[in-house]
Amino acid sequence: MSSSELAARMRERLPDTVVARDEVTSVVAREDLIGTLAGLRDDPALAFDLLASITATDWPERSPRFWVSYELYSTAHRHRVRLKVGLSEDDARVPSVTSLYPTADWHERETYDFFGITFEGHPDLSRILLPDDWDGHPLRKTEELGGVNTRFKGAFVPPVDRRTT
Amino acid sequence: MNPDTGRSSGPADPLSTTELRQETMVINMGPQHPSTHGVLRLLLELDGETVVTCKPIVGYLHTGIEKNCEYRTWQQGVTFVTRADYLAPFHNELAYCLAVERMLGIEVPPRAQVLRVLFSEMNRIASHLVWLATAGMELGAVSIMLFGFREREMLLDIFEMATGLRMNHAYIRIGGVIMDLPPGAIEMIEGLLDVVPGRIHEYESLLARNPIWVERNAGVGILSAGDAIALGVTGPTLRAAGVPKDVRKDEPYSGYGSYEFDAVTRDTADCYARFEIRLEEMRQSLGIIEQCLDRLREPGPVMVEDPKVRWPAQLEVGPDGIGNSTAYVTHIMEESMEALIHHFKMVTEGVKVPDGEVYQPVESPRGELGMYVVSDGEHRPYRVKIRDPSFANLQAVPTMVEGGLLADAVAVIASVDPVLGGVDR
């Protein structure tokens, strides 16, 4: 299926679908996420059985601030689609898709760890790559690169753009 | 326990588990442990020798590569992503560069594409050799460890000669590759093609019918195709379950569609199948390298001509390693003010990428390596997300380990071949 045909099929379910650089991207509302994913996975013509990745992007100046994106792949039809959910800053919650795709477990933990987005219904939403006692969510654009206290005599490593040496 | 084989019959036998579960023991395997393939930590709940639950804990090698990329130019991103999965540096670079090139809408010259395929496949062999070496060591076949690293050294010598570095090469750049093969490299690769097939045969004759190797691997760590897909597993572990998913075949990039090779599959879905697949993949890669050498007879540029994209410097390998060519330094420092300004602009600001987003998969030695790149139209990436295959594959370890013996856990981790640099990024 070419990307325009796939986009036409996706539009039947999600009207907000675009094709850019040969990739199909659909925007889905948070409330419809689980139902849509179940439909995409179980429809034999689409059969998106592999969830390759979940991640987010942070746009502090825009509304919605966060976009959570899901990269889906079909091992039968060998096509891809990206689903995106927009989330506002004060309500950064999205339902967990671990019940549909068990692989989402770690991907959602990583997105929580990096962006502080809550995946409701996740079996164990804890930090995965950063230490459990880490403060903040480092992939947010509002967090600086570096700027950490070290254990050596109270030394502080400033963020890279404020370093003088 | 089955008295004939000494193997656990697994949690399917409720009587034995309830009986024995009265006292389980929680042990910590790793993060510093010779058989965890890196800084992986497993929290294992044991019932005698049987694994009841297994929880992999990762993050010990997190280096913030994705965040760092956002603070550097697009070209500098190559030097960051290459460090993620340190056994597949060329694949990391390739996925990143392909993604950026798709955003820029540029096509790299044919010779650069051949070089990209050539190095990707040599990298695949090098990575599978490390897998063979470490997996052998973890299961007690120490001679294989020495053999694997011995042959890998031949590949690293080629990498060092062509790129200046043994690892983290930053050889594949946006718009092509940084430099053409130096004189003598083709002969070295031909030497590789003469030696390695015989060595692969040697590994096979040492292991394939070795009773200990077969006993430790066959029927161990079974992961069915359905489970593997649900858990997001790709690469040799998925192909061992009979699913011929290979990005090189399914979504060809860099001209892979024009090469002859097979996506190797097996049906037994166990550790032994993964061993067979990796050996066969090394042979397939040798075949692709041979086809690359044929195509490299045709000379041509190795980077796009567009001065707004191509890296301005010209590198060459000197007596003290790789560096800017003296002719180029003379040109910008003594001959042309415009060339110096251009050099300065490209090195400090770099290329401007139109806004948008791209997800670019490539087939790394461990599976689907995806690069999700977002641009806001500026000189720096807005977001770089590395979808590392080891990260997803490692999640499937509990499914394969739970209910089996503790010793089998070692075989299972080895067969999945996680590289923690990629998992933790």
Image (spheres, rainbow, N blue to C red):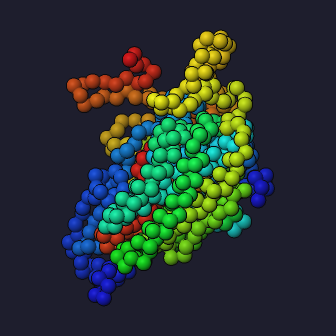
- What residue is shown at x 31% (from left), y 67% (from top)? B140
Q: In the depicted view, which residue is nearer to us: A9 or A30?
A: A9
Horizontal and vertical percent position of residue B374: 61, 37
Looking at the rendering, which quadrant does residue B234 occupy? Answer: bottom right
Asked if B312 appears above or below B49 in the picture, the reply is above
Q: In the depicted view, which residue is nearer to us: A119 or B23?
A: B23
Asked if B147 appears above or below B161 in the picture, the reply is below
- What residue is shown at x 40% (from left), y 55% (from top)? B149
The answer to whether one can see residue B351 in this image is: yes
Left or right: A9 as drawn, with respect to B331: right
How many numbered discs? Answer: 0
- What residue is shown at x 69% (from left), y 58% (from top)? B259
Horizontal and vertical percent position of residue B65: 47, 38
Q: In the depicted view, which residue is nearer to us: B357 or B93?
A: B93
Q: In the depicted view, which residue is nearer to us: B382 or A102?
A: B382
The answer to whether one can see residue B392 in this image is: no
Q: Quadrant of the N terminus of chain B?
A: bottom left
Horizontal and vertical percent position of residue A143: 45, 30
Q: Quadrant of the C terminus of chain B?
A: top left
- What residue is shown at x 30% (from left), y 52% (from top)? B31
